[in-house]
Amino acid sequence: MQTWATQHPRVWVILAEKAQADIWSRGANGFEVIAGVKGISDSPRFEEKFSEWLLSARDQDALDRIILIAPEEILRIFWEAMPTDVLACMAAEIPKDFSGLSQSERKKILEKMICV
């Protein structure tokens, strides 16, 4: 029997850059930022802390799937650091650099790019 959660999975889109990662989710008004984390390049343990945070969110039933959008070098860092439990939630990875774009430009691109 399918539940509402299996018919309508909660998908988080993570836009990661060298200095920050924003977590987007589609709401009633389209995509919006629901959380943000700064300091990716400042902390050698950032990826570990971030993956722990994602595991906690998954364990609290806050997300089903993750779409990670980042430049290729950031994607490599995340893949090396993420535990298999987080990787199991990964629906897609998109090698794209969103740095330099405003939040409204990012939202427009996500609306066209992600169909969830």
Image (cartoon, rainbow, N blue to C red):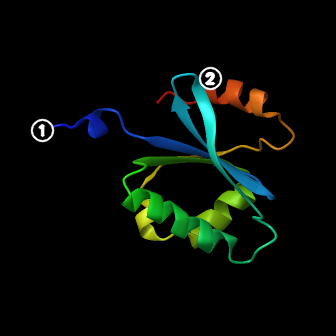
Numbered circle sitting on residue 112 = 2
Q: Residue furthest right?
A: 100
In this rendering, is residue 31 above or below 63?
Answer: above
Residue type beneath disc 2: Lys
Which quarter of the rendered picture does the N terminus lie within?
A: top left
Can you tell which of label 1 and label 2 is closer to the viewer? 1
Q: Give residue 88's position: percent from left, percent from top.
A: 40, 59
Q: Give residue 71's position: percent from left, percent from top.
A: 74, 51
Numbered circle sitting on residue 1 = 1
In this rendering, is residue 93 above or below 5?
Answer: below
Q: Give residue 59's position: percent from left, percent from top.
A: 38, 61
Residue under the image location 52 percent in, 29 percent down: 27
Q: Is residue 63 left or right of residue 22?
A: left
Which is nearer the N-term, disc 1 or disc 2? Answer: 1
In the image, 89 versus 63, the foreground residue is 63
Q: Give residue 6's position: percent from left, percent from top.
A: 28, 39
In the image, 43 versus 34, the foreground residue is 34
State the image quarter where residue 107 is shown. top right
Marks 1/2: CA–CA distance: 32 Å
Residue under the image location 75 percent in, 55 percent down: 20
State the image quarter where residue 13 is shown. top right
